[in-house]
C-alpha cells in the first residue's frame, strides 16, 4: 500500500484537493456566490481530478524508469516495489474512473461538453510522459497548464453553469480571481519543472532526452529559470500594491510567505551549482505554491476590510 501511495504521489494529490476545497469553501461559499455543486457533486469533482492526476503520476514513472535509475535510484518504484504490469493496470483503472466521473459530472451540471476536458487531460498526461516530456519546454508548459487547469475546473463546474443575467458580473469576477490563482500556479510550477530538469540533467542525458538544460547547458538554463522567476515575483508585488496595500496584516503575509521566499529562490539560483542545491530550490517552490494557495483563506478578511 505504501508503494502505491508513493507511486501516485499522494502528497501532491493532497495539495490539489486542498486547493480545490479552498476555492469552494474559503472563496466562493464564504461570499455566498451562486454555485452549482452540492457537497457530493464537489467530492466527485475532486475524486475525478485526483484520479487523473494519479494516473498521470503512474504513467510518468513507467516511462521514467531509466532516468529515475540514475537521478533517484532509491526512489524507483516501478520494476522494484510494483511491477510494470501492475502499474499499467493502476494507470488504466484511475483514468477510467476519472473519465467516467467526469462524464457523470458534466451531465449533472448541464454542460455535457465539459466531459471533453477529462478525456483531453487523460490523453495529454499519457502523451506528456511518452513524448512531450522529451521536448524542450513543451512538456514543462503542458504539465504546468494541467496543474493550472485543476484549479480552473472548480470555476468551470461551480460558477459557469450558475450564471444568470442578474449575477453574471459577480460570477465572472470570482472566476477571474480563480484564473489569477491558476496563473500563479502555472508560473511557479513551470519554474519548478525547469529546476527539476536541471537537477535531473544526468539521467535525462543518458536516455537521450532533449530538455532545456541539455540543449543549452546547465548554466544557461539556470539563467533562463532565474529570469522567469522575476515574473511571478513582479506579479505578486503588483497585486499587493494594487489590491492589498490597505491591510498591513495581509501585506505582511504575502511579504513573508511568498515575496521573500521568491527573492530567496532567485538568490539560491544565482548560487546553485550542486544537484542538492536544485533539489532544495524545487522543494522551496512547492512550499511557495502551498502558501500562495493558502492565501485564499484571507480573501474574505481582505474584501471585508
Image (cartoon, grey):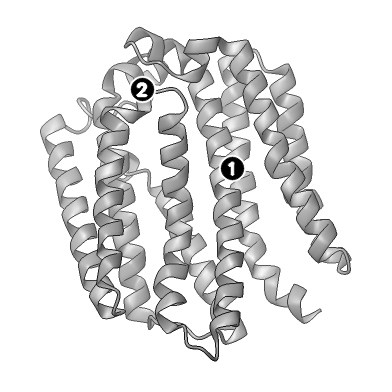
> Residue 2: x, y in percent?
30, 43
> Residue 225: x, y in percent?
63, 26
In depth, the one of 285 and 228 nearer the eye is: 228
Is residue 35 at all visible to an observer of this figure?
yes
Residue ID at (40%, 15%): 210
Q: Secondary structure at mark 1?
A: helix
Q: Secondary structure at mark 2?
A: helix
In depth, the one of 142 and 71 nearer the eye is: 142
Residue ID at (54%, 91%): 166
Residue ID at (34%, 58%): 49
| Picture disc at residue 57 | none
| Picture disc at residue 187 | 1
Work out whether 223 lies above or below 182.
above
- The crowd level at tag 1 (other Cα within 10 Å; few <14, some 14-19, many 20+) is many
Work out whether 271 lies above or below 246.
above
Check the picture and name the quadrant holding the C terminus. Answer: bottom right
Work out whether 68 lies above or below 127.
above
Work out whether 130 lies above or below 217.
below
| Picture disc at residue 134 | 2
> Residue 124: x, y in percent?
30, 42
Real-space CA distance between mark 2 and mark 1, rounded to the nearest whole angstrom: 20 Å
**258 sits left or right of 282 in the view:** right
Residue ID at (27%, 22%): 65
Q: Residue furthest front?
A: 165
> Residue 86: x, y in percent?
13, 38
**255 sits left or right of 213 in the view:** right
- The crowd level at tag 2 (other Cα within 10 Å; few <14, some 14-19, many 20+) is some
Specify which label sits upstream in the sequence, 2 or 1: 2
Is residue 26 at all visible to an observer of this figure?
no
Amino acid at each position: 500500500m505504501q508503494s502505491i501511495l508513493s507511486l501516485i504521489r499522494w502528497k501532491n494529490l493532497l495539495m490539489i484537493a486542498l486547493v480545490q476545497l479552498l476555492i469552494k469553501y474559503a472563496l466562493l461559499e464564504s461570499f455566498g456566490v451562486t454555485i452549482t455543486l452540492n457537497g457530493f457533486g464537489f467530492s466527485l469533482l475532486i475524486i475525478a481530478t485526483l484520479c487523473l492526476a494519479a494516473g498521470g503520476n503512474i504513467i510518468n514513472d513507467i516511462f521514467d524508469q531509466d532516468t529515475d535509475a540514475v537521478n533517484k535510484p532509491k526512489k524507483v518504484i516501478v520494476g522494484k516495489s510494483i511491477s510494470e504490469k501492475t502499474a499499467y493496470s493502476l494507470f488504466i483503472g484511475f483514468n477510467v474512473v476519472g473519465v467516467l466521473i467526469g462524464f457523470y459530472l458534466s451531465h449533472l451540471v448541464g454542460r455535457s461538453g465539459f466531459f471533453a476536458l477529462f478525456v483531453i487531460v487523460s490523453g495529454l498526461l499519457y502523451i506528456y510522459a511518452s513524448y512531450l516530456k522529451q521536448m524542450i519546454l513543451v512538456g514543462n508548459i503542458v504539465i504546468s497548464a494541467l496543474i493550472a487547469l485543476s484549479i480552473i475546473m472548480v470555476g468551470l463546474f461551480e460558477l459557469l453553469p450558475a450564471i444568470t443575467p442578474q449575477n453574471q458580473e459577480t460570477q465572472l469576477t470570482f472566476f477571474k480571481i480563480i484564473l489569477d490563482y491558476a496563473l500563479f500556479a502555472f508560473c511557479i510550477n513551470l519554474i519548478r519543472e525547469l529546476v527539476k530538469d536541471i537537477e535531473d540533467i544526468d539521467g535525462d542525458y543518458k536516455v537521450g532526452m532533449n530538455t532545456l538544460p541539455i540543449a543549452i547547458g546547465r548554466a544557461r538554463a539556470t539563467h533562463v529559470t532565474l529570469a522567469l522567476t522575476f515574473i511571478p515575483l513582479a506579479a505578486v508585488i503588483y497585486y499587493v500594491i494594487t489590491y492589498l496595500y490597505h491591510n498591513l496584516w495581509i501585506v505582511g503575509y504575502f511579504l513573508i510567505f511568498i515575496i521573500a521566499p521568491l527573492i530567496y529562490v532567485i538568490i539560491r539560483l544565482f548560487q546553485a551549482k550542486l544537484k542538492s542545491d536544485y533539489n532544495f530550490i524545487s522543494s522551496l517552490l512547492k512550499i511557495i505554491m502551498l502558501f500562495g494557495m493558502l492565501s485564499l483563506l484571507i480573501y474574505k478578511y481582505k474584501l471585508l476590510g
